[in-house]
Amino acid sequence: MKTLAHALAALLLAATVVAAPAQVRKDSVVLGMILEPAPGLDPTAASAASIAEVVHLNVLEGLTRIHRDGSVGPLLAESWSADPDGKVYTFRLRRGVKFHDGEAFDASDVKFSFERAKAEGSTNKAKKAVFDNISRIDTPDAHTVILVLNNADGNFPFRMGEATAVILDPKSAAGTASRPVGTGPYRFEDWKKGSAISLVKNEEWRGAATVKMKKVTFRFISDPAAQVAALLAGDIDGMPRFGAPQNLPQFQADKRFTVEIGGTGGKTIVSINHRKKPFDDLRVRRALAAAIDRKAIIAGAMEGYGAPIGSHMVPSDAGYIDLTGANPYDPERAKVLLKEAGVALPLNVTLTLPPPVYARKGGEIVAAQLAKVGIVAKIENVEWAQWLAGPFKGNFDLTIISHVEPLDFDRYADPSYYWGYDSRAFRELLAAYNTTLEPKARMKLLAELQKKLADDAANVYLFQLPQFAVARKPLKGLWSSSPIFANDLAALSW
């Protein structure tokens, strides 16, 4: 009887949660996020994509804007032009723009922000790829910025729309990590560490009349079961990047919710530390790739969602080529390669996994597959801040992570980057790509770049990270796909 009573009580509680009426909100919204921003809220000084999810386009703005379809449009710059050689870009700035603290925005702020990004000691993750390529910044007047590049960059307007290129004011820049001050439609209000971040509408924003939400709260919910419970109970109104794909059918069948499935620029990979033996041996890296069945990981960790990839680009990227056949699943070949490399088995390694489901569930599958070829992977589950302080600093053997920044194959040209890939041939290819303006020639070089990474088995490439947006049905405006990791809060409405 006692057991029956407990069972009935549990069923009643479950029914109560499912049937709980959602709180009515007309000018506010609560969104769920898997990862809390770390270590702060300055996307120009830290690498976590979760920072941009909160502040980019909302609190902080750049010269250009990347739309949900990947196209580039004006933002703080009304227009721009490039010289025929692709080395000089002229940006015409909006007039009358002010930062949240009342400071006027002008060309001097752009100059300050970019000089800060390229300064010695800068931790901007685009420093080497973007800002070190700027040789001169001219400001002939308060509303004109001329950027002179060392090498032509056909992707430069796109780069100016990434979170790494947001514009800060000299008076408030130093405090951006804890209290960001920008020019966007929302002001930073509060950050309750470990719980939530709240933003409030900037009534002085140039397009304030079109912004419907007066307050937006981000709640951090890393546990998939807790995400489901929060949505069902009405504690959150939506989750732009829902982390429990196994529960999608439940929400698709529930008339109170909308579910949209799209893609991201995320390359989900098993990162390999090239600085550690035996991973400096190409045969060992190819053995890792041959031992891992990416289709099984997509099925087991992502409920079948996600397109397989064979290099550091995704199918929605212009210039993508399918290289999944370059390092196919072949456990027997993996064993041969390990033997050729003189690896004594069992080979004991550590597999470090951050919180997202693709890493935790995918990591279990990867470990089981590696075990079949004699590689014993000890799983180490870590929180996001620990991942940033450990693997991202180069302290790891193997890790699973999704690199969500678009066109970030340029990271492989930096030998100091956390995976330690060091290829002069790749750097030469990238330099040729960056300085080539003719479209067909650029695409040819882009294909060669992808092939080089696949040939070198620089990492084990798994799948394109899908995006699952789940929300209460009245909520409109969430991105269904993310060419960049951002949430355009000004587009939300009930």
Image (tube, helix red, strand yellow):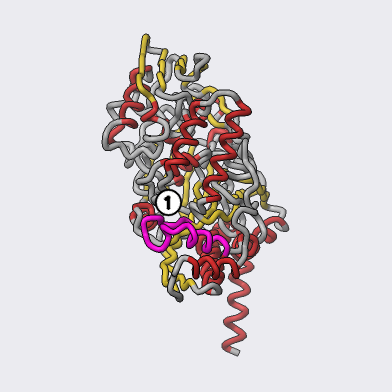
Vertical side of 314 occupied by 441: above or below: above
The N terminus appears in which quarter of the rendering?
bottom right
Counting from the top left corner in percent of width and height, residue 150 is at 40, 23
Of 339 and 319, the residue lying toward us? 339
The C terminus appears in which quarter of the rendering?
top right
Does the rendering let one see residue 19? no
Which class describes the residues within 10 Å of circle 1: few (<14), some (14-19), or many (20+)?
many
Counting from the top left corner in percent of width and height, residue 224 is at 54, 61
Pointer 1 residue: 36
Counting from the top left corner in percent of width and height, residue 109 is at 35, 22
Q: Amino acid at mark 1?
A: Glu
Of 173 and 379, the residue lying toward us? 379
Quarter of the image for residue 234 reads bottom right
Q: Residue at x 54, y 53 (%)?
A: 268
The residue sitting at the bottom extreme is 1
Q: Does 273 lie within the magenta span?
A: yes
Vertical side of 104 occupied by 352: above or below: below
Q: Residue at x 55, y 54 (%)?
A: 461
- Horizontally, is 239 left or right of 419 in the view? right
- Horizontally, is 268 left or right of 54 in the view? right
The residue sitting at the top extreme is 141
> Magenta region: which residues?
271-290
Counting from the top left corner in percent of width and height, residue 100 is at 38, 28
Of 218 and 171, the residue lying toward us? 171
Does the rendering let one see residue 158? yes
Q: Residue at x 51, y 69 (%)?
A: 367
Quarter of the image for residue 95 reads top left
Q: Number of marks in the image?
A: 1
- Horizontally, is 33 left or right of 393 in the view? right
Vertical side of 411 occupied by 3: above or below: below
